[in-house]
Image (cartoon, rainbow, N blue to C red):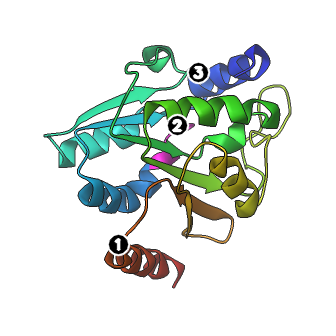
Amino acid sequence: MSEKYLEEYKLLHKNMASFGSGACLYLDELRLIIDYLRPKTVLDYGCGKANLIKALSEIYSDIQFYGYDPAVEMYNTLPVEKADLVINTDVLEHIPENELDSVVSKIASISDNAFFGLHHALAYTILPNGENAHCTVKPPIWYYNLMCRYYKTPYPLKGRKTELSAMITFTPSIPFLETYNALINNFQN
């Protein structure tokens, strides 16, 4: 991430206790994915304050969870080069469009299996410099085309709200999709 935006996010993490903690909203979806893939190592790429991996590690004591976030001092060094699964929730919209290829390419180099939680609207949060925290607001098809450059089988999924979607980079089974869609439909009703 460019130094300009990195400094803005460092300030947000420092000054807003709740910033970077929304990933736990994906806990149910990720439990479904983890139960399906049965990874031994999971990297949360853009982990914020690591609330999601802390919650997941309480559920899955036999899995090694790692966190990486360049804007959070405790997690600003990439801890692994390979993982069985990479989680990336509500991160890509914070990355300038011209840097997204580099980020997705790096994630793809770590694992063929990834879950991307995507947001397609402006954020409520404003950066200290006055800009919206979501600097890249694109529709799901745009992200699908981006993922096709780095993954063999990106698969778009519905999100809990109309402004959210998800993308997985492994081929799901019909029972997995049925369970995932039932889960998402419960949140939309």
Mark 3 against mark 1, which lies toward the viewer? 1
**Element under label 2?**
helix
Quarter of the rendering containing residue 63:
top left
Crowding at dot 2, Cα within 10 Å, few <14 / some 14-19 / many 20+, comes out as some
Tell me if 130 is positioned left or right of 15 in this view: right
Task: Tell whether position 79 is magenta.
Answer: no
Residue type at numbered disc 3: Ala
**Element under label 3?**
loop
The residue at the far left in this view is 62
Crowding at dot 3, Cα within 10 Å, few <14 / some 14-19 / many 20+, comes out as many
Tell me if 18 is positioned left or right of 9 in this view: left
Residue beneath label 2, please?
Answer: 108
Residue closer to the observer: 75 or 102: 102
Mark 2 against mark 3, which lies toward the viewer? 2
The residue at the far bottom in this view is 189
In the rendered structure, which segment of residues is drawn in magenta?
18-23
Residue 83 drawn at (x, y percent): 35, 33
Residue at coordinates 40% horizontally, 73% vertically from top-left? 180
* Numbered label attached to residue 176: 1
Give the CA distance from mark 3 to mark 1: 34 Å
Residue 132 drawn at (x, y percent): 81, 40
Quarter of the rendering containing residue 6:
top right
The answer to whether the residues at label 3 and label 1 have Cβ atoms under 8 Å apart is no
**Vertical arrangement, residue 122 with respect to residue 176, above or below:** above
